[in-house]
Image (cartoon, helix red, strand yellow):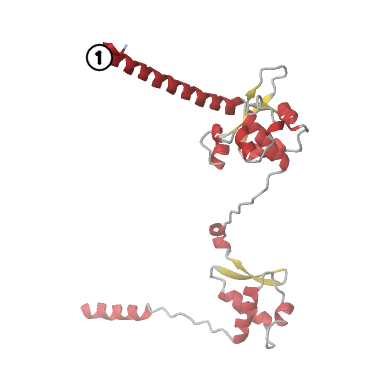
Amino acid sequence: MEIYIFVIMNKLKKNNIVKFSEFKITDQEKEIEAILFASNTPLDVEAIESKITKKTNVEKVLENLKNFYSNRGINLVCISKKWSFRTSDKLSNLLSKQKTIEKRLSKAAIETLSIIVYHQPVTRAEIEDIRGVAFGTNTLEILMELNWVKPGGRKDVPGKPIQYETTDDFLSHFNLQKLSDLPTVDELGAAGLIDTSSVEKSIFGTGKFYKEKQDEKSEDIYSNIDEMLNDTLSEEENIEKDPLKK
C-alpha cells in the first residue's frame, strides 16, 4: 500500500511541472513594437511599412504582437485600421487621472473680491458703486464657485438686497488667521499699491474688517486700563506702608 502511494505521488510531481512557452520575437517584430510604442498617434499598416528597415508581413506581425500583449497590462489594439498600445480595459479604473486646471482671475473678479474683503458685508449695488462700473458676466459667481465669497444675509433697506462676505476658505487660501491680518489703507499706500490721496479712509475697511480692527483697539485699551489699575494699587500699597510718601 505504501509503495503504491509513493508511485502515485511521484507521478503527480512529474505531471505538476509547469512549462512556460517562450515568445521568440524577430528583429522585424522588435522594430514594429518600438515604432508603435514611440508613436503618439495610432498608425496604419502603410505608415508602419514606411518606417521599418526590411519588408515583412506587417499585418501578421501585428497579430502576433496583439496576441502576446492580450493578457498584459498594455494591449495592442486596432481601431479604424490603425494600431496603438492602450492600457488594458481591466486596469482602467486604477489609472484614472485627476488634473488640476489653473485659471487666472479676471481684473473685474480681483477688484470685486478686494471690495468684498475690505467692505463686507456689501451688496451687489454697493460693489458696482465703488468700482464705478456694472458687473460683468459671472464675476461674482466665479468667486462663489471658488468658495471665497458667500451670501451674508440681507441688508435692512428697501428691497432687502443680498449682502456678500468672504469665507473661511478665503482666509485659508491666502494663509490668513483673520481679516484684520490684511494690510490697512496706510500700509497699502506705503507699499505704493494704492494712491491714498484718492481713498476715503472713512469708508475703507468697514464691516467685519473694521470691526476686527476696533476689537483689537478695545483690547489694547482694556490692557492699558489693567496696567493703570495695577500701578495705582501698587502706589496705594506703598503709601500705606510709608505714610511720609504722601
Residue to which mark 1 is pinned: 241
Q: Which residue is drawn at 54% across and 24% down?
A: 214
- Vertical position of residue 192 compared to residue 224: above or below: below
- Residue 1 showing in the rendered view: no
Q: In screen coordinates, is 19 left or right of 97?
A: left
Q: Residue at x 25, y 14 (%)?
A: 241
Q: What count of labels does the image hold?
A: 1
Seen as rendered, the residue at the extreme right is 133
Seen as rendered, the residue at the extreme left is 2
Give the secondary structure at mark 1: helix
The spot of residue 107 in percent (x, y) is 72, 42
Depth order, front residue of 100/228: 228
Q: Which residue is drawn at 58% across and 56% down?
A: 97
The spot of residue 67 in percent (x, y) is 58, 75
Q: In screen coordinates, is 238 left or right of 36?
A: left
Q: In which quarter of the image is residue 138?
A: top right
Depth order, front residue of 15/97: 97
Look at the image and tell me in which quarter the N terminus lies: bottom left
Q: Which residue is drawn at 71% across and 43% down?
A: 106
Q: Looking at the picture, which amino acid does disc 1 mark?
A: Lys
The spot of residue 145 in percent (x, y) is 64, 39
The spot of residue 65 in percent (x, y) is 60, 77
Look at the image and tell me in which quarter the C terminus lies: top left
- Residue 129 showing in the rendered view: yes
Q: Residues within 10 Å of mark 1 (few under 14, many from 20)?
A: few
- Vertical position of residue 121 compared to residue 83: above or below: above
